[in-house]
Amino acid sequence: MFAPGTAALLALADQRLPSGGHVHSGGVEQAITDGLVSGVRSLERFLERRLRTTGLVTAGLAAAASTLDQELKITELDAEADARTPSPAQRLASRAQGRGLLRTAKAAWAAPSATLNWSDLGARPHHPIVLGCAARAGGIEPEGAALAAAYLSVSAPSTAAQRLLALDPVAVAAVTVRLSPVIEEIAAVAVHNLEMSQLPDDSDPLLDLLAERHAAREERLFAS
């Protein structure tokens, strides 16, 4: 027997989910422009660094959101997400992707829970908060919500890098597979303590800088 919510978890982690994530590179476009990522090896290093910082934070936020069923708590968690995202450009990107995922979640499920409505999340909630609420709506445990967030933190940038550098799709897929143990490790760490004050807060100044430099550019392929 499969664990409840397994199919919903696969759907949330699927990049074909129409949530607008395909227009965001997670900083990899700027990293390529700045010469930090130029091939498969440097991409793998970039993705693991992103996974262990931003990925850990988003996994913790998604897992926490999947346990909440009050509007006030969701509002508090949204503020915690802001506090854990120093870069204004990253905050805007997170809210843009959250808004996109919210539209899809509304079409898929009536509400996150019996005591929480989609409108309680606001018009532009952070992406991991919507992801966590969608996970709850789909019957997914907090561990699953964290796993989906951690996976998405590397899958979307890897796809963007593949397009920008015309990399071999097989080689890029192999990178994601090699990172699978780290993805599971990060998800496990993220759910260790879901008290708001104890959620991961690992920032990465390099990713913050890349996001701000990218937002200031006039010509770019991806929104972030």
Image (cartoon, rainbow, N blue to C red):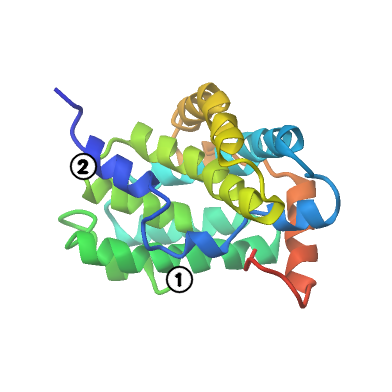
Q: Amino acid at mark 2?
A: Gly
Residue 148 place in picture, x, y as percent: 41, 40
Q: Amino acid at mark 1?
A: Arg
The residue furthest right is: 35
Q: CA distance from mark 2 to mark 1?
A: 23 Å
The answer to whether one can see residue 67 in this image is: no
In this rendered view, identify the residue nearer to me: 170 or 29.
170
Residue annotated with mark 2 = 139
| Crowd class of label 1 (few under 14; some 14 to 19; many from 20; radius 10 Å) | some
- Quarter holding residue 218: bottom right
Residue annotated with mark 1 = 124
In this rendered view, identify the residue nearer to me: 46 or 141.
46
SS state under label 1? loop
The answer to whether one can see residue 207 in this image is: yes
Work out which quarter of the rendered image holds the N terminus and state it: top left
Residue 192 place in picture, x, y as percent: 46, 26
- Residue at image position (61%, 63%) is 91
Q: Return the disc, 2 or 1, that comes first in the chain's sequence.
A: 1
Residue 181 place in picture, x, y as percent: 52, 21
**Residue 95 appears left or right of 75:** right
In this rendered view, identify the residue nearer to me: 223 or 115.
223
- Residue at image position (57%, 27%) is 179
The residue furthest bottom is: 218
Work out which quarter of the rendered image holds the C terminus and state it: bottom right
**Residue 84 appears left or right of 181:** right
Seen in the picture, residue 106 relative to 164 is either above or below; the reply is below
